[in-house]
Image: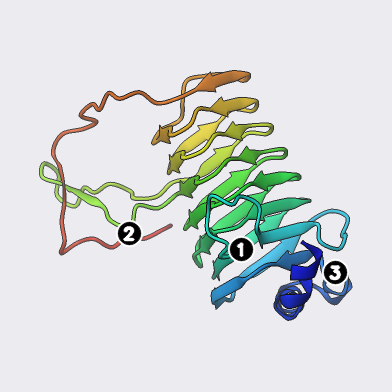
């Protein structure tokens, strides 16, 4: 990994000094590999002791996924509460209304995808396997046929308790709260908070139920407003 740091050192220097106070930036706590910057506004905050390379994003870790580094679109706030590693082929989007928080010792091996428009929080010691997605925003909303002006909210918070492990291929959507010490089985789709307590293994099944009747997608009224 050391030789690749030199190839993309300018990108890391630029990113650190753009977002961090000088006393933090000079130590280069954030190292990027093959970064692709779509937009860089918003804020990046690091809490706790600062060390060089304590946050590494995009480095090649899993050969099954492309060696494409990372894609970043930051318009809101990203907060790191300690060390973090986010592997290759990963993409992070944080809107102006979004706050994304990584706890101490966050580790995502490869192909992590995060879309944050409201609030996504990972507590400490979370391990995220290959090809996981976390998304707190629907991009489209549903309108009620029974109630004038009644619509689905279209967004909600995600909170992942500490010491949880997501196996490969999971999808986590809005309004999901995961207790601490939870293991999520491969290819699980989470659309609501599970009923488990701590120290459990959870997973999805093949059953699809009708969640609610009387809703539809109205193309003429599709914008979601976050309060």
- Please give the name of the residue rendered at 72% of the width and 59% of the height, measured from the top-left corner: 56
Q: Is residue 76 visible?
A: no
- Please give the name of the residue rendered at 20% of the width and 29% of the height, measured from the top-left corner: 210
x and y percentages locating residue 194 in the rendered image: 46, 25
Image check: 17 left or right of 94?
Answer: right
Q: Earlier in the sequence, mark 3 or mark 2?
A: 3
**Residue where numbered disc 2 is placed:** 224
Task: Tell me the crowding category of disc 2: few under 14, some 14 to 19, or many 20 or more residues within 10 angstroms, Cα based.
Answer: some
- Please give the name of the residue rendered at 86% of the width and 63% of the height, measured from the top-left corner: 52
Quick check: 6 above or below 165? Answer: below
In front: 25, or 158?
25
Q: Earlier in the sequence, mark 3 or mark 1?
A: 3
x and y percentages locating residue 160 in the rendered image: 59, 37
Label 1: state its secondary structure.
strand
In front: 2, or 145?
2
Label 3: state its secondary structure.
helix
- Tell me the distance, in whole angstroms, between the alpha carbons under discs 3 and 2: 37 Å
Most distant residue in the left direction: 145
User: Which quarter shows the N terminus?
Assistant: bottom right
**Residue where numbered disc 1 is placed:** 77
Tags 2 and 1 in contact by the CB under 8 Å rule? no
Q: Earlier in the sequence, mark 2 or mark 1?
A: 1
**Residue where numbered disc 3 is placed:** 24
Label 2: state its secondary structure.
loop
x and y percentages locating residue 125 in the rendered image: 72, 38
């Amino acid at each position: 990994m050391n030789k690749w740091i030199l190839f993309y050192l300018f990108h890391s220097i630029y990113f650190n000094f753009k977002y961090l106070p000088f006393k933090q930036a000079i130590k280069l706590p954030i190292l990027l590999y093959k970064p692709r910057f779509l937009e860089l506004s918003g804020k990046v905050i690091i809490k706790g002791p600062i060390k060089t390379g304590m946050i590494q994003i995009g480095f090649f870790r899993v050969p099954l996924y492309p060696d494409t580094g990372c894609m970043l679109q930051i318009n809101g706030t990203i907060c790191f509460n300690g060390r973090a590693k986010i592997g290759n082929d990963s993409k992070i989007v944080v809107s102006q209304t979004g706050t994304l928080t990584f706890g101490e010792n966050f580790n995502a091996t490869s192909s992590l995808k995060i879309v944050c428009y409201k609030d996504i929080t990972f507590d400490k010691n979370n391990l995220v396997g290959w090809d996981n997605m976390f998304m707190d925003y629907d991009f489209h909303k549903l309108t009620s046929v029974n109630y004038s002006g009644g619509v689905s909210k279209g967004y909600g918070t995600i909170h992942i308790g500490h010491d949880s492990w997501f196996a490969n291929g999971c999808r986590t959507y809005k309004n999901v709260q995961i207790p601490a010490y939870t293991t999520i089985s491969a290819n699980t789709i989470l659309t609501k908070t599970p009923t488990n307590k701590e120290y459990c293994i959870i997973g999805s099944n093949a059953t699809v139920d009708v969640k609610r009747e009387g809703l539809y997608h109205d193309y003429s009224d599709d914008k979601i407003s976050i309060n």
